[in-house]
Amino acid sequence: MSSLSRAFETSTARSGRIYRWVIAWLSVSAAIALLLLANSIRDYFFVARLIATQQTRHEMSQQAITLERRLRQDPTRKAAAVTSLMEAGGHLAWAELRGPDGKVLENAGGPSKRLFSDDEERKHARTREPLYKVVPTANGEVVVEVFPIRAPMSQLPPGPPVQAGPPSPMMLQIAMPLSDIDQSNFWPIRRNLIINCSGALALLVTVVVAGFGFRSYAHGKHLDEQLEIARQVQSELLPSLTEKYIGVDLATEYAPAEQVGGDFYDVFPVKNAGTALVMGDVSGKGVPAALLMGVIHGAVRSSLWFESPSRHESESQELNRLLCESASRERFASMFWCYHDPAVRSLSYVNAGHCPPLLVRRSGGGVEISSLDVGGPVLGMLPDARYEHAQVEVSAGDILVMYSDGLVEAANSRGEEYGEDRLREVLATVIGKGADAIRRAILNSLASFSGAVEPRDDLTIVVAQFPPVGR
């Protein structure tokens, strides 16, 4: 069992490493998806704000050009230029016109505060670089920009004499809400936002689904590995055919429908120099059946049922009570257990509801096939069930064929079952052959009958041939 323990530890460690690596990869993928989502939203607001600001500035520059044109055309409208601009602009928050000396000539739209210094405004007028800010107000953010208004000297208001050189311009400060813009310009970036967010969310959902799916996969993979170890444990419980048993030649076939099964067989020597043969079939298949099979296997090995016929019957009743107490009524087992005494050439048995083994022997010029069906009901259903021991004589060359219902109940594509009659037909033709040849003949017949149909139940066959004394 040490090799199985090492296999279990290696499997667990390998599964743990794979699980940690995959979880780390999924975590990184989830972080990337969240970063992509956050970056898409951040970029949208950044670009939207930039577009809104540029669109607002463009509209304000058009208003400033309009006002400058009006002042150049009609100097007399200078006093009401800002008011006219507010009435025509519609979306302006406020506007203020200042003279070359910095004094306010006109203000409309409410009180305003000067956001830029004289030096900033003079540099702006000289270099024509944009001079604007986005400032918060009680009604939301507004864009405030200063525009130089250049009018003829004759149109400038009276004031102190100016120095020689180019005339200083008037300064027009305009404020416009950032929200009063054409929303149709935002459709391209909103479309990109939808696409990017959809991709990020799809990646995130995929990672989450993959995470939950991998947990299920890892759990299933771990169970598969445990089942494989259980299959190895179960296979080690089966007898080794390399061992020579007194008075019997063996050939076996064991094919569980799943990784572990409920069929079992055992062969072991007994103290009176004979050989014990056991076959059982637990109801159902898979892990529950395999667990109950292990209980029965241990009970059979630990009891001394082969000491006498009465002991054989009492041990059958005791095993039946044990299963009735420890297993649910949905779980029961059929079993045929016998022991061969080569000294007196007899086979003693009890059949507890199992498929009757067939004893094949020559009789005159033909073949006689008899069923070994004496015993009682299946184990684990009736606590007070009684069992009867039987004994038959065996001669050199006789053959005992034990099998589970996975053989006779195997079906073909038309739904027909293989049945005991077909098995008898095969056995009638192989009486002179060895145990392994008989096993192969049975399997070939079954394969020819069932074709490509998958087996529905565990299949177990034990062929025991009784050779002449001394072999």
Image (cartoon, rainbow, N blue to C red):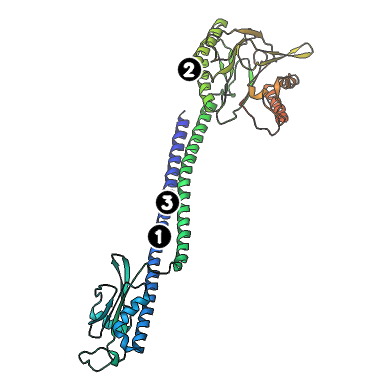
Determine whether 97 is above or below 454 in the image.
below
Crowd rating for badge 3 (residues with CA inside 10 Å; few <14, some 14–19, many 20+): many
Which x, y percent locates residue 413?
A: 71, 31
Q: Is residue 270 left or right of residue 394?
A: left
Q: Is residue 171 left or right of residue 209?
A: left
Q: Which residue was labeled with disc 2? A: 326
Determine whether 460 is above or below 371 in the image.
below
Whether tag 3 and tag 1 are in contact, CB under 8 A, the answer is no
Question: Looking at this view, is 439 or 61 the one in front?
Answer: 61
Which numbered marker is on residue 294? none
Question: From the image, which quarter does the C terminus lie in?
Answer: top right
Q: Which residue was labeled with disc 3? A: 30
Q: What is the distance, in whole Å, between disc 1 and disc 2 at their CAs?
A: 63 Å
Q: Seen from this angle, which residue lies furthest left?
A: 160
Using the rendered view, name the quadrant where residue 81 is placed.
Answer: bottom left
Q: Residue at x 46, y 67 (%)?
A: 184
SS class, disc 1: helix
Q: Earlier in the sequence, mark 1 or mark 2?
A: 1
Q: Which residue was labeled with disc 1? A: 41
Which x, y percent locates residue 289?
A: 54, 24
Which x, y percent locates residue 307?
A: 54, 8
